[in-house]
């Protein structure tokens, strides 16, 4: 058991313990714990599932059924930044389908895929609650509104520059 | 300067530049006055004020808030925790009102929650926040830190013997988490499957304890109601409903946005005066009054008041109050397909009509849209609407809600479906 838990870092464990401190039982923090591991590692591996399940006193199968239920828990590796591209109704009316095509062409990926240089993963997301600024997307933690093909190009170029790279 | 809070209580601290109102600015504008008044009253008196105010839940169903709270066991309550939860999972397609309230004025939600928790004597509260709302998570955690430091939260609030712990929980994303019993499952760390009612959460909710789940906008109203009274709140509304409402418009209009207006403002006023009407070259064909799971209404309904009963009588629902406009250059079949696609994806998979019926419906719509529709598809769609849409055939309201835009599109725009099938192409698509 301890060998398994060693797969979690002390910082991860400290954050999970903080959640457990105000929960009635350990497995009640399953979703928080998955999010903590993902925040540190980018995604949740089989090994993390096993280690977490042991730590939370639940079965790995049950924890995995929770992990795979939620849209924002990634059970496969993702790029440095996830692009959450809204494809819900108001963005659709405002032409998001063509823009998704544009972004896909530019990055050479389709939804669900990661760029070869591992920078971006493109995922569709339900309505981001910014429908008055449709179409919208998130790149990492940043929301981008009133998208056009040109603004998408600029956003991706800026993102490269801010990482100290040239596009 | 007139007190904007008298007429626009919810957005009195929402500024053009969308800056966040911190504790000092919030207090300077009358903030936490409602809480100070509340703790001077008994919980029973607070409940009476909320009942008298005639406030109805702003999360979509419009259930009277005071009545909902009155089912929480009070004096005879068995010992143990009681919970209050703010439903901040805003994910109904076309809905963007709670985000604005949390990003610009987080203390309003916090104060509203403390007042509400005091009224039902809850000792633990949660904000169940959508994971993608990064900025709201920041503004709310800052506000919570300030509120704890100022003695509005924690032990012995404002020197009384009332104590409350308030936690922020960020979700891992699924529309069904917004359904209140599914939300409770999710907060317990499980898959977000809805639960059978009864028992109702008011009696047996989070970890089997009495629990109230309310929408963000609902809770934001509470501090103002306790501060200024039920009569003041009643007279804010135009018709039989009380208070103001966060109304929104999205689609091909001049000025899409979200505004706090008297509840019962007409659709026309919202669309033409606030949203500035349709963009040049576009005509309105219909609108979903309150998010993706409400029935289409059309031009003939423009002069109706946006309130629960008026929109209900017209055959739709006010829902979240944020309208989505269908214009004459957007394909109604494609729009409904987009919505059904969303609901099919977000189905929790617990019951068959929803898990299997929604993808089937989507596939039929996809065939029609792609120019491969068959005459019998109309019969299939009508059957799905009757079967999946019937309350009681599914475990929760997601699937019936999904059928609302489809059933009303079949009613108001049948010729569009028929043209797709007869012409074997989408008349709106460029390629068509
Ligand atoms: C599928 C589904 C999703 C829902 N999503 C939300 C939501 O995101 N936010 C919300 O406040 N209510 C949502 N609701 C309504 C809640 O179940 C519940 O009625 C509401 O939170 C009660 O609050 P209120 O009485 O203040 O309106 C949803 C309902 C269903 C059936
Ligand atoms: S109707 Fe859909 S979302 Fe609701 S319980 Fe059934 S499968 Fe789940
Ligand atoms: S539909 Fe895209 S943000 Fe709402």
Image: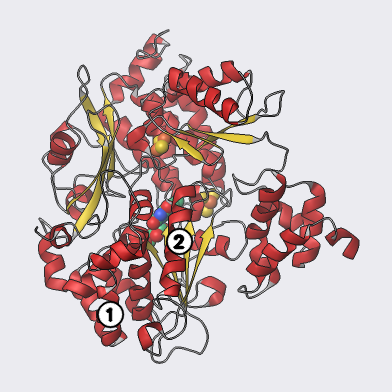
* Image point (23%, 80%), residue name: B48
Q: How is the image coloured?
A: secondary structure
**Where residue B65 appears, x then y in whole percent?**
29, 68
Residue density around tag 1, few if under 14, some if 14–19, many if 20 or more, within 10 Å: some
* Image point (44%, 39%), residue name: A127
In the rendered structure, the residue with mark 2 lies on which chain? B
- Residue located beneath label 2 in the image: B142
B386 vs A31, nearest the viewer: A31
Tell me the quarter of the picture where residue B203 sits.
Answer: bottom left
Asked whether, in this view, residue B277 is left or right of residue B178, the answer is left
In the rendered structure, the residue with mark 1 lies on which chain? B
Disc 2 from disc 1: Cα separation: 21 Å
* Image point (26%, 42%), residue name: B248
User: Which mark identifies residue B36?
Assistant: 1
* Image point (77%, 68%), residue name: A57
Asked whether, in this view, residue A117 is left or right of residue B288, the answer is right
Tell me the quarter of the picture where residue B244 sits.
Answer: bottom left
Does the beta carbon at disc 2 come under 8 Å from ligand 1? no
């Amino acid at each position: 058991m301890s060998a398994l838990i060693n797969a979690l870092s002390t910082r991860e464990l400290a954050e999970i313990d903080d959640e457990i401190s105000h929960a009635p039982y350990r497995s009640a923090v399953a979703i928080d714990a998955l999010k903590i591991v993902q925040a540190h590692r980018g995604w949740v591996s089989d090994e993390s599932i096993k280690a977490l399940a042991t730590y939370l006193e639940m079965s790995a199968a049950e924890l995995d059924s929770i992990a795979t239920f939620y849209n924002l828990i990634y059970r496969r590796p993702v790029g440095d930044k996830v692009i959450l591209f809204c494809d819900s109704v108001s963005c659709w009316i405002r032409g998001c389908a063509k823009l998704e095509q544009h972004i896909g062409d530019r990055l050479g990926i389709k939804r669900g895929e990661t760029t070869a240089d591992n920078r971006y993963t493109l995922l569709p997301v339900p309505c981001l609650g910014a429908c008055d600024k449709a179409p919208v997307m998130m790149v990492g933690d940043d929301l981008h509104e009133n998208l056009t093909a040109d603004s998408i190009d600029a956003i991706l170029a800026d993102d490269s520059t801010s990482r100290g790279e040239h596009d | 300067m007139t007190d904007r809070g008298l007429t626009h209580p919810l957005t009195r601290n929402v500024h053009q530049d969308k800056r966040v109102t911190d504790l000092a600015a919030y207090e300077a504008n009358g903030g936490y006055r409602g809480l100070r008044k509340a703790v001077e009253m008994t919980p029973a008196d607070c409940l009476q004020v909320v009942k008298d105010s005639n406030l109805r839940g702003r999360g979509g169903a419009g259930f009277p808030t005071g009545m909902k709270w009155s089912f929480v066991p009070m004096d005879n309550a068995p010992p143990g925790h009681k919970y209050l939860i703010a439903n901040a999972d805003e994910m109904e397609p076309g809905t963007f009102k709670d985000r604005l309230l949390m990003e610009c004025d987080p203390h309003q939600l916090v104060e509203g929650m403390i007042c509400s928790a005091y009224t039902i004597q809850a000792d633990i509260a949660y904000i169940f926040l959508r994971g993608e709302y990064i900025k709201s998570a920041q503004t709310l955690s800052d506000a919570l830190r300030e509120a704890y430091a100022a003695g509005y939260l924690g032990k012995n609030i404002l020197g009384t013997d009332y104590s409350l712990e308030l936690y922020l929980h960020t979700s891992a994303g699924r529309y069904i988490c917004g359904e209140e019993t599914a939300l409770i499952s999710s907060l317990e760390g499980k898959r977000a499957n809805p639960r059978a009612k009864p028992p109702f959460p008011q009696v047996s909710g989070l970890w089997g304890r009495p629990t109230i789940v309310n929408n963000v906008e609902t809770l934001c109203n509470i501090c103002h109601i306790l501060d200024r009274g039920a009569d003041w709140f009643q007279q804010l509304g135009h018709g039989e409903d009380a208070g103001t409402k966060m109304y929104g418009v999205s689609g091909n209009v001049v000025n899409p946005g979200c505004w706090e207006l008297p509840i019962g403002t007409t659709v026309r006023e919202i669309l033409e005066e606030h949203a500035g009407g349709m963009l040049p070259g576009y005509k309105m064909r219909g609108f979903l009054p309150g998010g993706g799971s409400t029935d289409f209404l059309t031009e003939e309904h423009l002069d109706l008041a946006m309130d629960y009963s008026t929109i209900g009588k017209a055959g739709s629902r006010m829902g979240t109050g944020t309208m989505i406009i269908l214009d004459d250059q957007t394909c109604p079949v494609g729009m409904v397909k987009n919505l059904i696609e969303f609901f099919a994806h977000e189905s929790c998979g617990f019951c068959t009509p929803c898990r299997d019926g929604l993808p089937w419906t989507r596939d039929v719509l996809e065939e029609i849209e792609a120019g491969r529709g068959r005459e019998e598809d109309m019969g299939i769609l009508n059957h799905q609407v009757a079967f999946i849409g019937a309350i009681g055939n599914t475990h929760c309201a997601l699937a019936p809600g999904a059928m609302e835009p489809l059933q009303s599109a079949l009613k108001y725009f049948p010729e569009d479906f028929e043209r797709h099938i007869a012409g074997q192409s989408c008349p709106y698509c460029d390629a068509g």
